[in-house]
Image (cartoon, rainbow, N blue to C red):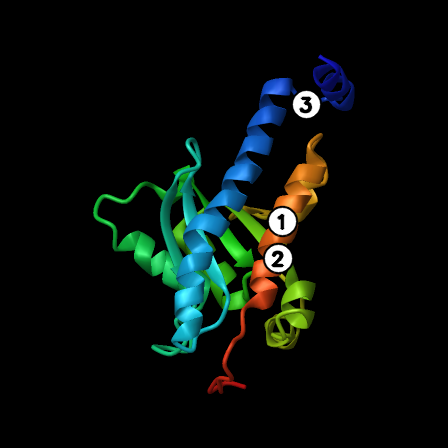
């Protein structure tokens, strides 16, 4: 009873039902990353690929439709998001992308964010931001390309093509933020433990 009283006090303009649904969405996204994406990524790393990956979830049920991971050994442009998109569209009678949620383990590079937009996904959720990609995952070239080619610091979160959300930032707003943050920390530890082999990109 005390929990629900505290929860109601935390709610301002948002409806209780919507708040619970958002928390469920974030929990479902984190579960999908841990259960469906990370095992695929671990296998890819063993084959010499990178940690970046993606998922497509049903926007209503939050069930995983497809997962994809970096496949640079086959083609240097087969980033995790590209692999996910290719897998999604190879599914016979795949759902309309606008009825799905696209999950990126890391903030997409300029190529991948454009591919997601061209594919018709309207809602994107990201776990690690551009700064994480540059520092913790040692891929500063993503931001460098944004700056050198387009003169910007990254993709706009809210634009005519999609809305992009930070899983961590949205989780911080929830009444059970502490529980969500613990789940995020657990996933972050898993990613931090992955060891990626050296790879020479043709464009770098």
Q: Residues within 10 Å of mark 3 (few under 14, many from 20)?
A: few
- Secondary element under disc 2, as helix, strand or loop, is helix
**Disc 1 to disc 2: CB gap under 8 Å:** yes
Which residue is identified by label 3? 14
Nearer to us of marks 2 and 3 is 2
Whether residue 94 sits left or right of residue 40 in the image: it is left
Whether residue 11 sits left or right of residue 180 in the image: it is right
Which residue is identified by label 1? 184
On the question of residue 153 being in view, the answer is no
Tag count:
3
Residue at the far left in the pictured view: 92
Give the image quarter of residue 132.
bottom right
Q: Which of 198 and 165 is in front in this view?
A: 198
Q: Which mark is residue 79?
A: none
Which residue is identified by label 2? 188
On the question of residue 45 being in view, the answer is yes
Whether residue 26 sits left or right of residue 152 in the image: it is left
User: What residue is at 41 percent from the left and 51 percent from the top?
Assistant: 36
Q: Nearer the viewer, residue 137 or 83?
A: 137
- Secondary element under disc 3, as helix, strand or loop, is loop
Q: Residues within 10 Å of mark 1 (few under 14, many from 20)?
A: many
| Coordinates of residue 149 in the picture (x, y in percent) | 60, 75
């Amino acid at each position: 009873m005390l929990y629900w009283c505290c929860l109601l006090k935390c709610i301002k303009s948002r409806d209780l039902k919507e708040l619970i649904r958002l928390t469920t969405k974030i929990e479902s996204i984190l579960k999908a990353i841990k259960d469906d994406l990370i095992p695929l990524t671990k296998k890819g790393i063993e084959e010499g690929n990178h940690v970046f990956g993606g998922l497509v979830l049903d926007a209503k049920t939050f069930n995983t439709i497809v997962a994809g991971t970096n496949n640079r050994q086959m083609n240097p442009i087969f980033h995790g998001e590209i692999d996910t998109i290719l897998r999604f569209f190879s599914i016979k009678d795949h759902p309309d992308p606008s009825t799905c949620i696209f999950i990126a383990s890391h903030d997409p590079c300029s190529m991948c964010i454009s591919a997601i937009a061209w594919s018709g996904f309207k809602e994107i959720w990201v776990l690690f931001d551009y700064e994480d990609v540059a520092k913790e995952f040692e891929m500063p070239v993503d931001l460098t390309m944004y700056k050198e080619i387009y003169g910007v610091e990254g993709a706009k979160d809210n634009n005519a093509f999609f809305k992009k959300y930070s899983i961590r930032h949205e989780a911080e707003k929830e009444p059970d933020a502490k529980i969500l943050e613990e789940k995020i920390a657990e996933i972050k530890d898993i990613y931090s433990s992955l060891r990626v082999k050296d790879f020479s990109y043709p464009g770098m």
